[in-house]
Image: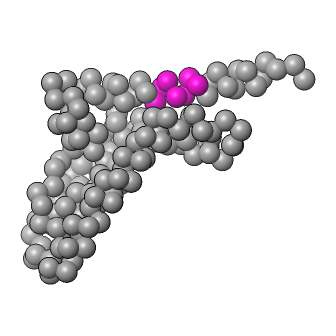
C-alpha cells in the first residue's frame, strides 16, 4: 500500500546531490534531537496513563497515542518520527536504517535474540494494558453511586 511510496521517496533521496557542509552539520545536530523526541513519545505511550487521571485532554491525547502505536506496530505504516530520523541521517551522510524505530533500536540493543514478531507483540500488549487501565477507570466512574 504505502510501502512503494516510501521506497520511491528513498530512491529519489539517494539520487540527490550531497548537502553542503553547513546543512550536513545541521542534520547531524538535529538527528539526535529527533531520536530523543521519539524515545519520549514511546515512553509517553507506555506509561502515559499514569499521568492522565483527572485530565480529560491528556486522556484523549494518550488514548489517541495508544491507537496510533498499535497501528504503527501492526500495519504497514511508518511513524513520521522514524521517517524524519531516516531523512536527517541521510542528509547528514550517515546510512539510514530501514524498518520501525522500535525494531531498529530495541532489537539491536535491548533484545538482540528475540524475533521481530515478539517485539511487536510486546509493544501491542503494552498498548492493550494501557487501554485496560482506561476501561477499569471508566467502569469505576460508571459504577459510582450518584
Q: Is residue 134 left or right of residue 25?
A: right
Q: Is residue 127 visible?
A: yes
Q: Quadrant of the C terminus?
A: top right
x 43%, y 47%: residue? 41
x 58%, y 25%: residue? 133
Which of the 4 quarters of the picture holds residue 138?
top right
Report if residue 14 lies within the magenta region. Answer: no
For the magenta stretch, what is the residue range?
127-133
Q: Is residue 1 left or right of residue 112?
A: right
Q: Is residue 130 left or right of residue 80?
A: right
Q: Main secondary structure of the magenta part?
A: helix
Outermost residue toward the right in this view: 146
Nearest the viewer among 139 and 105 is 105
Say above or below: 127 vs 40.
above
> x%, y% of residue 131?
54, 28
> x%, y% of residue 114?
19, 24
> x%, y% of residue 101?
27, 44
Amino acid at each position: 500500500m504505502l510501502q512503494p511510496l516510501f521506497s520511491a521517496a528513498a530512491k529519489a533521496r539517494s539520487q540527490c546531490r550531497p548537502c553542503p557542509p553547513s546543512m550536513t552539520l545541521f542534520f547531524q545536530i538535529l538527528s539526535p534531537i529527533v531520536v530523543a523526541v521519539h524515545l519520549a513519545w514511546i515512553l509517553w505511550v507506555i506509561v502515559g496513563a499514569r499521568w492522565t487521571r483527572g485530565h480529560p485532554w491528556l486522556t484523549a491525547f494518550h488514548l489517541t497515542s495508544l491507537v496510533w502505536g498499535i497501528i504503527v506496530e501492526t500495519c504497514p505504516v511508518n511513524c513520521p518520527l522514524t521517517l524524519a530520523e531516516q531523512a536527517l541521517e541521510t542528509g547528514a551522510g550517515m546510512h539510514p536504517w530501514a524498518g520501525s524505530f522500535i525494531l531498529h533500536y530495541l532489537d539491536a540493543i535491548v533484545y538482540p535474540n528475540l524475533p521481530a514478531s515478539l517485539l511487536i507483540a510486546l509493544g501491542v500488549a503494552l498498548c492493550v494494558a494501557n487501554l485496560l487501565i482506561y476501561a477499569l477507570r471508566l467502569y469505576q466512574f460508571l459504577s459510582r453511586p450518584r
